[in-house]
Amino acid sequence: MLGIKRLGLLAALVLVGVAPAAAAQAKAQPSEQDTQYLQAIHQVNLFEITTGELAQQKGQNQRVKDLGKMFVTDHTQLDQTVQQTASQLNVQLPNGPTADQQAVIDRLNNASGKNFDREWVTAQLAGHLQAIQATQTEISQGSEQSVIQLAQTALPALQTHYDELVQLAQQLGIPVPQASATGTPSPGATTESPAPGGTETESPAPGGTETESPAPGGGTTETPAPGVS
């Protein structure tokens, strides 16, 4: 009889231990928004590291080389946090960039000279705009605090990269995507895909509006940087 009571007590203790563990596991499951952001920003990082290395190897303009080095450093550091956060939340990260991002990498591999510089800056402008938009969306719509904090940390670096790219694009005479009055980037192509960096191959000039109206008559290309209200 005593043995039965002990077994009952042991079973109760096991259940008490299992319940919090199950609750913790359920809590660890991030929302679809959080999961998609972690996966997308990881692919952005992979893309930026690869294209940053290409810029250092193939860039003709010294500023292209310098920005490429900056992007490799910053996105490598950011991705370490992304991987740690994803591991804690049991989120599977992709093994490589998106198909569109890989197509841009392939195009850059085949470009050379000044054409490479222009292709690189154009792709980076579009990719960073999309990354900024996705990060702003995570900050406003995310539910997992660790992912939101990651996005809050990433945003200033992405903004700095974009501002540097805008200055370089203006020096090289490359059209810059337009930004809305609120400072949120809103180029034409960024709404076609929520994944940052995913639309570069849909048009040789990401953003759609750059090549259609490059003349500065509209004024939109003169104040492109998001965050300027």
Image (spheres, grey):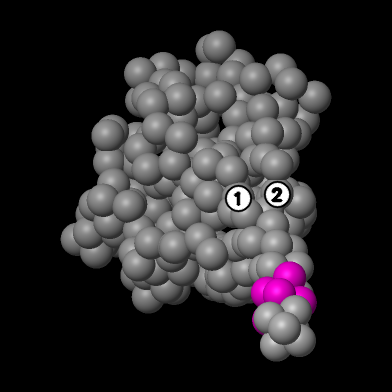
Q: Is residue 38 magenta?
A: no
Judge whether residue 10 is colored magenta: yes
Residue at (37% x, 75% y) in the render: 57
Residues shaded magenta: 7-12
Whether residue 228 is visible, yes or no, is yes
How many circles with numbers are drawn on the protein? Answer: 2
* Secondary structure of residue under mark 1: loop
1 versus 66 height, above or below:
below
Report which quarter residue 129 is drawn in: top right
Which of the pair 85/55 is nearer the observer? 85
Which residue is at 70% across, 62% downward?
19
Is 32 positioned to the left or the right of 225 in the image? Answer: left
Q: Main secondary structure of the magenta part?
A: helix
x then y, percent, for residue 36: 50, 46
Q: Which residue is mark 2?
A: 144
Query: Which residue is disc 1 drawn over?
Result: 30
**For the point 72% across and 83% down, which residue is it?**
1
Give the quarter of the image for residue 59.
bottom left
Task: State the residue lying farthest toward the left.
Answer: 110
User: Does residue 186 appear to the left or right of 116 in the view shown?
Assistant: right
Residue positioned 47% across, 50% down in the render: 40
**Left or right: 20 in relation to 60:** right
Q: Secondary structure at mark 2?
A: loop
Q: Is residue 116 at least partly visible in the picture?
A: no
Quadrant housing the C terminus: top right
Give the mark nearest the N terminus, 2 or 1: 1
